[in-house]
Amino acid sequence: MKIKLNDDLLEQDYLDNTLTVQDVDRTRKRKVQEKRQKGTPYKDEELSFSYHASQHEKQWLIQSIQDLYAQNWIEDILLMVRGGKEATVYLCTAPEVSNTRLLAAKVYRPRRFRNLKNDHLYREGRDQLDATGKIILDDRAHHAMQKRTAYGLELLHSSWVGHEFRTMQILADAGVDMPRPFVSSDNVILMSYIGDQDTPAPTLNTIELAAFEARELFQRVIHNIELMLSHDRIHADLSAYNILYWNGGIFLIDFPQAINPDENHNAYRILARDIARICGYFSSQGVMCDPEALTRSLWKSKGRNLEPSIDPHFLDPENDDDVRHWKSKGA
């Protein structure tokens, strides 16, 4: 057996049976730790994970997570939890000194992510953020994003990741049932893991609920939607496919498209779509609900008008439509 270590003497010692597999593993970890401390980039063979990825996937993974690995957030990747159009989630372990040993790493697929359909619908009114969720103030960066240069597309991708990370921070702090985010990089969000080492939490769409549990979980989902609205957020892609079920509880996931209802003209329609999808699943579980009435009730309960308010200074007294609108308001 030959183990590649980039160290001819160690490799020969192993072949001569003077080193054990454990010795080789300890040596590899020591070398990686030294590079962590020095900030030196790793080579593919130096990052050895329990998860056996293809060569292409391994290169993509190492490029994506090596900064978090260097910062001692990740010790090992155990398995792929689930794949998706825009990202893949992996189960990771943190170093033994960490309070949380199991972590989920959401690793984005940049090319697919840049081509997300109708992303303009969700970007309306957004600040452009970097991967850590901070506002980008550089004029040249904004110009590159507007022109969609190669550099600008990379920034837009990082901004999308940063937006999800910042949204998760806000909503987790607000008490929404969801994984807690810990740290992000240009291509990864590291968060708490839902499930155990052998069994990741399934998505709600795969679960058949008893009638009493369905009613309780429906109310819990609506509570979360209301809580998000209270903190100026709409999920914008909510369905039973984006809710995890574990130990009788629910956890909302996947927030890159989340919007601020005060900044997006399509907010009410997007909220109505989210609630219609939720009602569709729970109706199949025996829960009676009226998605249109529920949407109106939640929207108005937060002091929002079903029709956008218009400043009278922007109305044209010579325009018949504007005059009719003004009269309909009892002015």
Image (cartoon, rainbow, N blue to C red):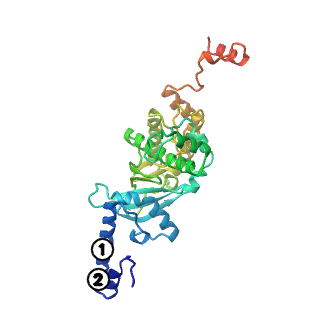
Residue 63 lies, in percent from the top left, at 46, 61
User: Of label 1 and label 2, which has the lower sequence position?
Assistant: 2
- Residue 142 image offset from top left, x and y in percent: 54, 41
Which quarter of the figure has residue 43?
Answer: bottom left
- Label 2 packing within 10 angstroms: few (<14), some (14-19), many (20+): some
Q: Which of 70 and 118 is in front in this view?
A: 70
Residue placed under numbered mark 2 in the picture: 19
- In this view of the protein, which residue sits in the foreground, 174 or 51? 51
Q: In this view, does 47 lie to the left or right of 239?
A: left
Image quadrant in which the C terminus is located: top right
Q: Picture quarter containing residue 171?
A: top left
Taking the spot 58% from the left edge, 55% from the top edge, the residue there is 112
Q: Reply above or below: 192 against 146.
A: below
At label 1, the amino acid type is Thr
Image coords of residue 24 (percent x, y): 32, 77
Q: How far apart are marks 1 and 2 (CA)?
A: 10 Å
Judged left or right of residue 80, residue 317 is right
Q: Residue furthest front?
A: 140
Callout 1–callout 2 Cβ contact below 8 Å? yes
How dense is the environment of label 1, judged by Cα within 10 Å: few (below 14), some, or many (20 and up)?
A: some
Which label sits on residue 40? none
Residue nearer the viewer, 86 or 185: 185
Under circle 1, the secondary element is helix
Check disc 1 and report the residue beneath it. 27
| Observer able to see residue 266 | yes
- The answer to whether residue 85 of the structure is visible from this angle is no
